[in-house]
Amino acid sequence: MFSDLGECLISAEQIQDKVRQMGAVISRDYQGKDLVVVGILKGSVLFLADLIRYITVPLSIDFVAVSSYGASTTSSGVVRILKDLEESIEGKHVLIVEDIIDTGLTLKYLLENLWARNPADVKVCVLLDKPERRKVDVKIHYQGFSIPDKFVVGYGLDYNEHYRNLPGVWTLKPEIYSK
Ligand code: 5GP
């Protein structure tokens, strides 16, 4: 399976350094606020689990699942909620945590959907950003790494449900996903 990997784009150490820094900034920004960290399943699970350990203010966590690309690597542009939040976010300060922003369609949809529930605030935290691929404008409040337009796996990101457990971020050999 690992023979399908290309290069290591971001090492586990680089990720942990960055996530620690992001956690420190978020801790400062959310002092005294009622924070709900919302992870987008499944890709954000590793990032969220590490990030909240670096956040020092009280928080709760919740998850949404949205329709994703499935086995394909190109965006359909159609977003659907597969699993909704369990708690109300009315009056809360929501921080959406996402593994990667690509076209921006998923986050744009989710932002509109969550804002309609009368939260005090909704902000976006993404580990990876592929700016070249953006189709819609989405404001990112906390961003880890900007990466080139390559399909990546690891640290929560999958290809056909594999590779999520890699501690770093890797490219996949193009011949694998263009099959
Ligand atoms: P967007 O709606 O911004 O186009 O896409 C966001 C979602 O696309 C991410 O949550 C992720 O599931 C998927 N995605 C985008 N780029 C990649 C990539 O390079 N690798 C993987 N594994 N998923 C990606």
Image: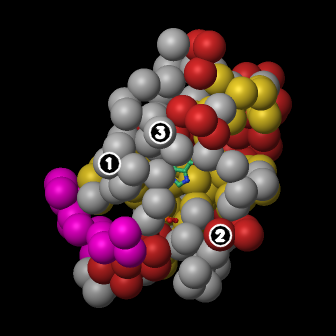
* Callout 1: CB less than 8 Å from ligand 1: no
Q: Is residue 156 magenta?
A: no
User: Mark 3: which secondary structure?
Assistant: loop
Q: Residue at x 72, y 68 (%)?
A: 131
Q: CA distance from mark 1 to mark 3?
A: 15 Å
Residue closer to the observer: 160 or 20: 160
Q: Residue at x 35, y 44 (%)?
A: 71
* Callout 2: CB less than 8 Å from ligand 1: yes
Disc on res. 48: none
Mark 2, residue position: 133
Residue 85: give x, y in percent of width and height: 22, 58
Q: Earlier in the sequence, mark 1 or mark 3?
A: 1
Q: CA distance from mark 2 to mark 3?
A: 21 Å
Residue 177: give x, y in percent of width and height: 51, 40
Q: Residue at x 78, y 33 (%)?
A: 10
Residue 87: give x, y in percent of width and height: 20, 58
Quadrant assignment, res 119: bottom left
Mark 1, residue position: 70
Neighbor class of circle 3 (other Cα within 10 Å; few <14, some 14-19, many 20+) is: few
User: Mark 1: which secondary structure?
Assistant: loop
Disc on res. 179: 3
Three-letter amino acid code at the position of disc 1: Gly
Q: Is residue 41 visible?
A: no
Three-letter amino acid code at the position of disc 2: Arg
Q: Nearer the viewer, mark 1 or mark 3?
A: 3
Q: Earlier in the sequence, mark 1 or mark 2?
A: 1
Q: CA distance from mark 1 to mark 2?
A: 18 Å
Mark 1 touches mark 3? (CB < 8 Å): no
Total residue callouts: 3
Please tell me whether residue 19 is drawn above or below residue 29 in the rendered image. above
Q: Is residue 125 visible?
A: yes
Range of residues picked out in magenta? 76-92
